Amino acid sequence: MNRTVWLLGPQRRPTVQHVVRDLDPQSRIAFVTAGWQERESDDAELRDLLGGRGVNLTLHARWLDVHEQDREYGNAEREHHAAMAELRQLYLTQLDHVLQAAYAVARGKEGRPRFRDAALDDALEAVRLVDRQHLVRVRAAHDAFYAAWRPQERPAVARHRDEVRGLMADVEAVVIAGGHVGDLLTVLHLFHLEPYLPSVVLAWSAGAMALVDRVVLFHDHVPHGVAQTEVLGDGLGVVHGLVPLPHARRRLRTDDPIRMSALARRFAPARCLVLDDGVRIRLEADGSLPTGARVVTADGQVTPGETA
């Protein structure tokens, strides 16, 4: 179906109301705050921004209810998440070494430039290989879990899927807020939201990240030092060829062209899209970015642009 997708910056200074005001005032809007976890129902401000016509799909509460009603499935899912955490730690160990090697080559001064450039290309390809192999293993693990437990056939899950599908039947737009991207992805996949998305989708922060093909986590400023940008897994695949970067100015070392260049080149041809405060990006009909969208370039710079 033809779909209008808006990717917004963080809503510390809300902008979502400027988008939804152009919708039919009689239309209903579904929204997802599952990334807020136990604060999912603290949605009064968002309801006001949506003009009082929003319905919360309460996906996080539904997830907890599934665990309560189907203890066997809940235990299996927790074990699966524990296994995925182990897989992630192995990946991060590999990733740290190959990324540090790439940064060391990029910062090196010895040798002829053409040799250094070739070595950097090889180092970044090693990073991409580690990313690809991790994504293959994540997909295989998820496929094995879903094949073994077939959540769509379990009554507790099926009931909530039917209810969510009913709520989505007559909405014009869906709004997906940020928060914990891992939990958000879990419930979006579990309750099978993607096939029922309406003609207008708005998302910010973790919500924007969840819409793409491949979800990338990033944070250069953490209490224990510098964390490495990592591939988490598959998103909904509504948006293609983008790596959303919410809070980019706060989370990335944008003044370090070597790290920023490695980020852009590592995920190319996907484009690293900066989604800072105040940004409103309406994707073009073919899914491409409009003029003025800010992206990280191969030389580690952020293109000048405008907030809508």
Image: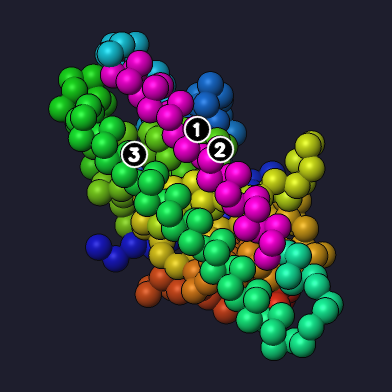
Compared to residue 274, the image places residue 32 above or below, namely above
Q: Secondary structure at mark 2?
A: helix
Task: Tell which circle, 2 or 3, labels the residue nearer the N-terminal end.
Answer: 2
Asked whether residue 87 is drawn in magenta, I would say yes
Query: In the rendered structure, which amino acid carries the disc numbered 2?
Result: Gln
Q: CA distance from mark 1 to mark 2?
A: 6 Å
- Where residue 85 is drawn, which disc sits there? 1
Task: Tell which circle, 1 or 3, labels the residue nearer the N-terminal end.
Answer: 1
Magenta part, dominant SS: helix
Query: Callout 1: few (<14), some (14-19), or many (20+) C-alpha neighbours within 10 Å?
Result: few
- Where residue 245 is drawn, which disc sits there? none
Compared to residue 28, the image places residue 252 above or below, namely below
Q: Residue at x 44, y 34 (%)?
A: 84
Image: magenta residue range: 73-102
Q: Secondary structure at mark 3?
A: helix
Name the residue at the front extreme: 111
- Where residue 89 is drawn, which disc sits there? 2
Compared to residue 294, the image places residue 176 above or below, namely above
Q: CA distance from mark 2 to mark 3?
A: 15 Å
- Where residue 141 is drawn, which disc sits there? 3
User: Within the image, what quadrant is residue 99 found in?
Assistant: bottom right
In-image side of 131 versus 104 (left or right): left
User: Within the image, what quadrant is residue 252 found in?
Assistant: bottom right
Residue 113 appears at what percent x and percent y? Answer: 75, 86
Q: Residue 228: in sight, yes or no?
A: yes
In the image shown, does 275 or 56 lie closer to the viewer?
Answer: 275
Compared to residue 81, the image places residue 261 above or below, namely below
Q: Residue at x 31, y 52 (%)?
A: 198
Q: Residue at x 39, y 44 (%)?
A: 138
Circles 1 and 2: CB atoms closer than 8 Å: yes
